[in-house]
Image: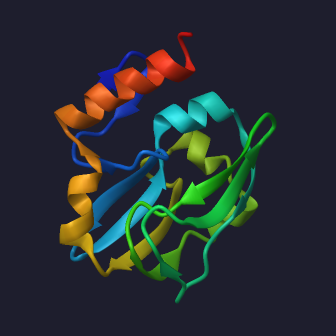
Amino acid sequence: MVKVEEYDLPDDLYYHEEHCWVKIEDGKVRIGFDDFTQKLAGKMKRISLPFEGDELQQDQPIGTIESGKWVGKIIAPVSGVVVQVNEKMEETPWLINDDPYGQGWIAVVEPSKLQEELPKLHYKEKAVEWTKREIKEHVKK
């Protein structure tokens, strides 16, 4: 785990520009929102998840999320087919706030273009530098 100021950034994850993380697990990927987004957005109140069987395209919307001060789209960090959704999120979307890298995951995807798309994501030192830029742009104006 790396700390970038007050934001946790697990160093075994890949990060999309729209603040979703990707964890590779036995050929599938688990996705969720990063710590930066959940802290900026505040307590999550509602989430609209993709459905099992949905085909995702990298960089395209797959759902929405709403906090008391923010409504945003969930953007697919990778292409593929949804094989599992975190149904607990529909009743307790604040799991993203409580545990963004654990219980607050969104979906598991069978990726279709993983080797092609992974280089487009932030990883390790590139993720740290990107997070520093995001803090500078969105927090410390």
Looking at the rendered image, the quarter that the N terminus falls into is: top left
Q: Position of residue 124 (x, y in %)?
A: 19, 38
Q: Is residue 140 left or right of residue 87?
A: left
Q: Is residue 101 left or right of residue 122?
A: right
- Tell me how the rendering is colored: rainbow
* Identity of the residue drawn at 42% across and 72% down: 108
| Residue 18 vertical position relative to residue 136 in the rendered view, above or below | below
| Residue 139 vertical position relative to residue 61 in the rendered view, above or below | above
Q: Quadrant of residue 38?
A: top right
Residue 1 in sight in this render: no
| Residue 29 vertical position relative to residue 39 in the rendered view, above or below | below
Residue 83 in sight in this render: yes
Task: Choose between 127 and 86: the one closer to the eye.
Answer: 127
Task: Choose between 83 and 61: the one closer to the eye.
Answer: 61
Task: Choose between 53 and 26: the one closer to the eye.
Answer: 53
* Identity of the residue drawn at 79% across and 34% down: 69
Q: Position of residue 135 (x, y in %)?
A: 46, 20
Label total for image: 0
The single residue placed furthest to the top in the displayed view is 141
Looking at the rendered image, the quarter that the C terminus falls into is: top right
Q: Quadrant of residue 91?
A: bottom right
Q: Position of residue 111 (x, y in %)?
A: 32, 77
* Identity of the residue drawn at 65% across and 65% down: 63
* Identity of the residue drawn at 30% across and 59% down: 23
Q: Position of residue 30 (x, y in %)?
A: 38, 65
